[in-house]
Image (cartoon, rainbow, N blue to C red):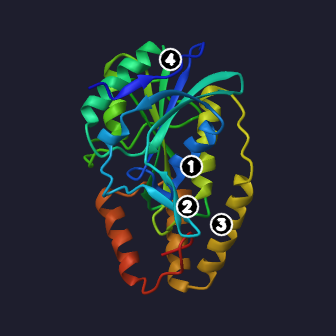
Amino acid sequence: MNLVQLVSQPELASPALVIAFDAWVDAGSASSAAATALAEGGEAVASFENDVLYDYRARRPTLDIVDGRPLRLEWPQLTLRYSRLGGRDVLVLTGPEPDFRWRELSADVVELAKTLRISQWISLGAIPAAVPHTRPVPVLGTESRPGLLRGNVRPGPEGLLRVPSAALSVLDVAVGQSGIPALGYFAQIPHYISGPYPAATVALLRAVERHLDIELPLGTLTEEVDQMRQRLDTATALDEKTRLYIEKLEAMVDEERLPSGDELIGEIERFLRERGNDIGEGQIH
């Protein structure tokens, strides 16, 4: 079974494809929000066999009931849309992370990418990390070969890192092995924050801007960033343990000192163990 079908084939000039899935590797909903912003108003290019890709008991469709009448179902689905952004042709693949058939999907997506003559594959993601909200959002990169990243983003972390894979990474590897340049930008989200983190969404959109040499409209995102920062600063000021912990993170960032894996995990566990209360979604926990 082919899991992907072209529904439109616009005339494209050296298109880039940007991909982000929600759920895994989408801390603070930062990468899925960035992809949604890029795809807004775009033309549908491909359809996917979503009934085969998703477990509807794990990702139940949303039902709208109006005045006691079931009216609409919104199903989880992958979408591939075409947008013209800053003079560049950009395709955006996004949606909930698929539950099934990752290897089949990656093979079909590689064939689709070749059909559409994709010039480069750009993954967006976000991961929790021991970083403070009071500093610019750090962005790490991945690349299928050296020299693909731009905007002073470095590939990392150094050395071997073994982690559970996301569907995003399965597609990245398949695309890179097919010969299409594949790279990724991953925002690091303060691990003590719950809920959406718009500062990271902006950081990822800026990374796309620099990579493609275009300008993107941010809409209300800058206001959301300012509002979130004010709430976080207020929450920090009200709790001495939180304030001291964030000051420690600031010192590490300012010294450009990266903690070891054991040190990072130990610090996060200690902080969470000593926190006795939640301040609320979108703030600090």
As shown in the figure, which amino acid type bears the numbered disc 1?
A: Ala
Where's residue 280, x and y in %? 54, 77
As shown in the figure, which amino acid type bears the numbered disc 3?
A: Met
Which one is in front in this view, the residue at disc 1 or the one at disc 4?
1
Q: CA distance from mark 2 to mark 3?
A: 9 Å
As shown in the figure, which amino acid type bears the numbered disc 4?
A: Ser
Are the two marked residues, 1 and 2, in contact with CB atoms closer than 8 angstroms? yes
Upstream in the sequence, badge 4 or badge 3? 4
- Element on which disc 1 rests: helix
As shown in the figure, which amino acid type bears the numbered disc 2?
A: Pro
Name the foreground residue: 133 vs 70: 70
The quarter in which the N terminus is drawn is: top left
- Element on which disc 4 rests: loop
Where's residue 131, x and y in %? 50, 60
Q: Is residue 138 above or below residue 144?
A: below
Name the residue beneath numbered marker 2: 196
Q: Which mark is residue 119?
A: 4
Q: Is residue 175 visible?
A: no
Name the foreground residue: 128 vs 159: 128
Where's residue 190, x and y in %? 50, 62
Q: Residue at x 50, y 70 (%)?
A: 248
Name the residue beneath numbered marker 3: 228
Name the residue beneath numbered marker 1: 33
Upstream in the sequence, badge 1 or badge 4? 1
Graded by Cα atoms within 10 Å as few (under 14), some (14 to 19) or many (20 or more), the crowding at tag 4 reads some
Q: CA distance from mark 1 to mark 4?
A: 23 Å
Q: Is residue 68 above or below residue 144?
A: below
Q: CA distance from mark 4 to mark 3?
A: 36 Å
- Element on which disc 2 rests: loop
- Element on which disc 3 rests: helix
